[in-house]
Amino acid sequence: MTEPLLSVRNLTVEFPTRRGILTAVQDISFDIMPGEVLGVVGESGAGKSMTGSAIMGLIDRPGRIAQGEVILQGRRIDNLPDAEMRKIRGRKIGMIFQDPLTSLNPLYRISEQLIETIRTHLPLSETEARKKAIGLLDDVGIPDASRRIDDYPHQFSGGMRQRVVIALALCAGPDLVIADEPTTALDVSVQAQIIDVMKRLCAENGASIMLVTHDMGVIAETADCVAVMYAGRIAEIGPVRDVIKDAQHPYSSGLMGAIPRLGANLDRLTQIPGSMPRLSAIPRGCAFNPRCPHVMDKCHIDQPQAVQTAPGRRVACWLYPPQDSTGTNAERQTAQ
Amino acid sequence: MTRQILSLSAMLLSSTLIVSQASAETIRWARASDALTLDPHSQNQGPTHNFAHHVYETLMDRDVEGTLTPRLATSWAIKDGAPDTWVFTLREGVTFHDGAAFTAEDVVFSLDRARSEKSNMRQLHVDVAEVTAVDDYTVEVRMTGPSPLYPNNLTNTFIMDKDWSEANNVVEVQDYAAGEDNFAVRNTNGTGPYILQSREVDVRSVLTVNDNHWAETKPEVTEIIYLPISDAATRVAALLSGEVDIVQDVPVQDIERLSGTDGIKVETGAENRVIYFGYKFGDAPLASSNITDSNPFNSPAVREAMELAIDRDAIKAVVMRGQSFPTGIPNPPFVAGWTPELDAYPAVDLDRAKALLAEAGYPDGFSVTLDTPNNRYVNDEAISQAVVGMLGRIGINVTLASRPVAQHSPLVTSNETDFYMLGWGVPTFDSAYVFNDLVHSKEGSYGAYNGGLYSNPALDAMIKSLGTETDLEARAATVAEIWDVVKADRVLLPIHNQVLAYAMNDRITLPVHPENQPLMTSVTFAD
Amino acid sequence: MENRKLVKDIPEQDLIVPVRAEGRLARALDSDIFYSWRTSPVTVVATFVALSLILLAVFAPLIAPYNPFNPASLNLMDGFTPPASTGAFTDNYFLMGADNQGRDVLSTIMYGSRVSLFVGILATLFAMTLGVSLGLIAGYNGGTIDAVIMRVTDIQLSFPAILIALLIFGIARGLIPANQQESMAVWVLILAIGLSNWAQFARTVRGATMVERQKDYVSAARIMGVHPILILLRHVLPNVLGPVLVIGTISLALAIIEEATLSFLGVGVPPTQPSLGTLIRIGQQFLFSGEWWILFFPAVTLIALALSVNLLGDWLRDALNPKLR
Amino acid sequence: MLAFIIRRLAQSVVVMLFVALIAFVVFRYVGDPIASMVGVDTRLEDQEIMRERLGLNDSVIVQFLRFIGNAMQGEFGISYRLQQPVTELILSRLPATIELAFVSATIALVFGVIFGVYTALRPKAWSSAGIMALSLVGVSLPTFLIGIGLIYIFAVELGWLPSFGRGDVVDLGWWRTGFLTESGLKSLILPAITLSLFQLTLIMRLVRAEMLEVLRTEYIRFAKARGLSQRAINFGHALKNTMVPVITITGLQLGSVIAFAIVTETVFQWPGVGSLFIVSVQVVDVPVMAAYLMFIALVFVLINLVVDILYYVVDPRLRVDGGAGK
């Protein structure tokens, strides 16, 4: 079995507030294999983006990783000093942000931003870096790249800017790209192109992708595996096809109803009545219990643990109580 | 190389030594404001004249006692057989700074210039009919009538060189409206003891001693650096930190601190200036009063009550820190006509004052606005403030309106004020100067500063007679008579005569000048 | 509150903690604003300083040891009595000494703060009303009206407040008859300071209004024919109150200092009804003569007042975190 | 770019006319110029003659047109008080004010930006809290008190620095500089500090607020996510973006340094245009006041123009949409 590229173990992210501690991400674990595309899906506030930030070590104060480990290529990175972490950001893990309009510094030319990033990580001269940058822009599909490289961000359209962002995220050849809702802010007509570009380039470079989105359609088309998050926890994780075909968690099955409408916004999802609880008011037991059509007494009392239901599939729901005999998931899950 | 540096620094050292030796006779003289102009006939204003006295000279001068002394004129007398003509004998051997000789034609030119239409000195020469040169060193001034006191008017009329003025096109006094620059505003050519070297308006002027000056005793001060510093605290700070040698306008409250400071001493002396309050006469109700059917000030009882309520001694002790001479008459002691009897003032008597107010029909007092300048006289605003409190004690409720003098004095001259403070200096040292402007009814050139519109036809007649009376004894009698009426009628409410204070480096001696026109020639050094 | 700014990944509503407390007071005490106030000792101290100065000023006639404006109670001969001693001519005890007119410095400060606060608060309210109105009008209407108002705002912002105030003071002096100038002085001062400080309000409110105007509910209200004034008052105004409050607090401190500076330059209120600035101007004359208390206490009071109000403004700015531009 | 500057210039002319109107109206009706031109002892009929000669009896419109006409030629008449051409007076005072303003502005800008950046990068540090607290004290202290305090401490008590004036100056053509002598430089210290303090705190707080704002933006997060060094992020990306709004407000603030100098120049007896103005106000020297106002307006118009152009240079976004300011 190949070593996973990224391994997240029991990750918990907390935000202390004056009313107590908010748990934005609770005890989540997953792996990303080399070349794999992992989709992370969920409503706003489910903890998807926070997970991405946690992996990058970019959680703003006063938030902190309270527990768990992030292991990249066998090396633990969640506790690295900032200087070490900087060598990983961009070089090992690239990140694509949601809004291309705000993620580029408006006062610097595209060339300056690209060359600066390339030279931060790679031992290239100015000219070499520039050549590489033009090549990257070509790759992401910016026409006339050698001329446009000296333009400022505001001179590009939204879709083009996101291509630039992708070029920036990939310019030092990372092994993993965390794409945080890369198409949400874009026009529907260009969303597919951007996903294509991203996927193609990562495939060419052999990079894995962690694709954070609340668009199940994108996941269906792009991802190999999908993790469904709800209220800071992973409700279900497994190969995309399996999850779509046979969602085991009641929340996932609700989500899947949205797939036919490509690009549907989960925030307006009506299939599941009610809305996700606030982080400060997560109900006891299973967080989904107020909305669950299959809710049982037990759901109000205890939190369900993730249980392996099939190879590579886990679900946290009392409909699938833990069975001691099925221990195949033990290697991926620390004991509770 | 090293030797060069050494010799260079030695040179620098020696040059600084020379400088410091020379600066032993340099005096840095600070006062509140600069001369407005160098044109000697353009402005009739204290600091301007004071500055001009160092560069230009007058026919006669006034010493610290206030008596006339010869300057460019060695003697003067009324011409025999012509009571309306004054004859001036001029000093010989005097030269202007540019080397030209001083002669009678310069005096004729300067007096004519001073009484020309654009001159601000014109009023002092308004009775002059003609000025003629008899010979090179004799000048006759014919007046429109007998003018026994005319020489008193000449102490601030400076003599310019006729040829220089013509050559530089400054025969006429500068005309603002024409918008043209006038050479004489910034350049000088006088006969005075100092020569102007440089001048930055409001910043600093440098004067050096005139080696060719006619006076036998050379002044000890060879260089004057004149520094106007308008802010009082900064001025005092500059003296305390040794950046200036003399501060001419010392706030009274700082006298004690300064005289208590090592190396600094303070000279004080009386100024020829009285501070007084004026009020509106006439039957018309006051604009600022709650009494709308009569004018309280028109009642002699009210005026007496006010005098009885004001504690001049307290003002002297607290507001003026002892630096004033309280007085009962609006006439400084320097002026002919002043007597100790007139100067006396009543003791405070609040009960009597209240009774008088009731008697006058104002048992509950009344309200009125007092207009006061706040940047003209020593502690002017604080004096007014104290008077507000004192009048308040007998029920006169006074609102204080405080303004810079530029906005204050028009209120007085246009009679827009009900109750005001003013100070009056008497450059002629003669009572007529006070009567003409303050006591005479407002008509023509008389009563210009009669802010309260006091009018007494009998007095007016007597005042007019003073101008032409040649019998000095009879004249003095009339003056005394007028003063008696003025005092009895309480035409004005005098407070005190101002005291001047000069603070200086204690190596220096500079006596206070009654017209606040100290000459640096009179400075002596202790060592 | 800090959290809200820093936590990008958590939607805002998640950080708003559900209301647990009952009753209005309890709710207020439980609020975020109160929490951030309670946890900032500097702000608490500033609040108490500001409040006590304001109370001392408001109730000066009741609690001041003497009425410095009642001539019967003071004697000029008490002038310059040092602090913590009794006057030479009256039995008055002067905790902070007596000034050059024999007035109790403590009392003049209390009465003087009254004038300073009165002028400062009214001037700020005036500036606020004017600026907010103009900002709303400009932001809501756009177009030429907006351009004109913003141009005037630019000009106004270009000139230092003190110069504008001097100008307005000059105009007023020229227009008001001499015998009414003193009674009008305070109002002229309020006008002058108010007119020199409105632009900041206008600019901020205009920006916020433009944003609000784009929003759906405002468009809807407009289409339904709701009167613009009603829209502005009901929908737009509440949204700009935060920044207005912050600017208002800071403006108050500025107004108090501006009043002091104008009075110091001699164009403020008359010395018989002194403000703190006038007291400082008077006291400054005695800087070198040893009567330090005449300058010192009013100066300290002015600084304490301005500083505490500024601190409150600073805290409000952090607490409400409005976009101030 | 050219069209943009021309439009700005046209706006400036309107502003100048507006200010000219104010300048004229205000000072025509404040106080009585004659009363201030003459001594207390000048007779009234002489005053009337002067009034006539000065054209003060003409109609207001005539006077205003005359004022504008003259102002266009840089001609503001003769100072009532000093009897010298006003333009010349102001020009002779200008170097002192500009040198003071320049030094103050430099102090304010350099320390304002340094402290602002420092406190923004270390928002929790004690030193930052201290600087912030001090800055509030700075804003709360009236300028005149600071000046008086500094004079008292450094000139009177310690005797280290001069209390007034600008020391010895050196003539460089018409420009009189205090930069070249020791006493000139020493004299500059106290007034420059006094004048700069208020602007310093303003700039510092502005830089801090903007910087904190910028540090929270997505592009800074993206820059971090690309592994750029802290230095490159703070001083390259964040600082440059911070400077855009800071430039505008700072530019305007620096302009007001010149006008603010009124109080400082009065306290320190600094021979600049500010003290000339305040003395002129006191004696109602109308031509000087009007000229000063026009001068300040001109300074602001010029600074605005420079700021606009700078903005244009710094922010590429403006270059496309033709400089739509905010």
Image (cartoon, rainbow, N blue to C red):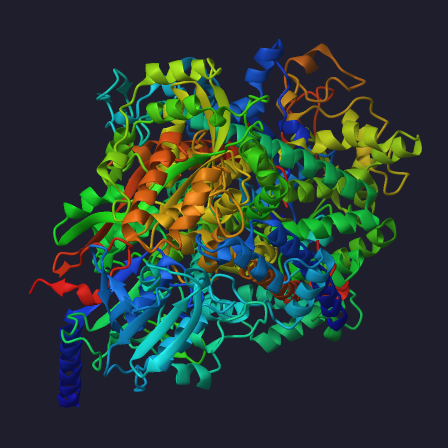
Name which residue lies at 64% across and 62% down: D55
Q: Nearer the viewer, residue D212 or A34?
A: D212
Q: Position of residue A112 (x, y in %)?
A: 62, 67
* Residue B406 to residue B291: above or below: below
* Residue C74 to residue A148: above or below: above
Q: Position of residue A66 (x, y in %)?
A: 51, 33
Q: Nearer the viewer, residue A38 or A146?
A: A146
Q: Is residue B405 left or right of residue B80?
A: right
Q: Position of residue C60 (x, y in %)?
A: 44, 18
Q: Quadrant of the N terminus of chain B?
A: bottom left
Name which residue lies at 74% across and 71% down: A148
Q: Position of residue A238 (x, y in %)?
A: 73, 37
Residue furthest to the front in view is B81
Q: Is residue C297 visible?
A: yes
Name which residue lies at 13% across and 89% down: B3
Q: Nearer the viewer, residue A82 or C153?
A: C153
Name which residue lies at 78% across and 27% down: C234
Image-quadrant location for residue D304: bottom right
Residue furthest to the left in view is B527
Q: Is residue D139 visible?
A: no
Q: Is residue D278 left or right of residue A266?
A: left
Residue furthest to the right in view is C224
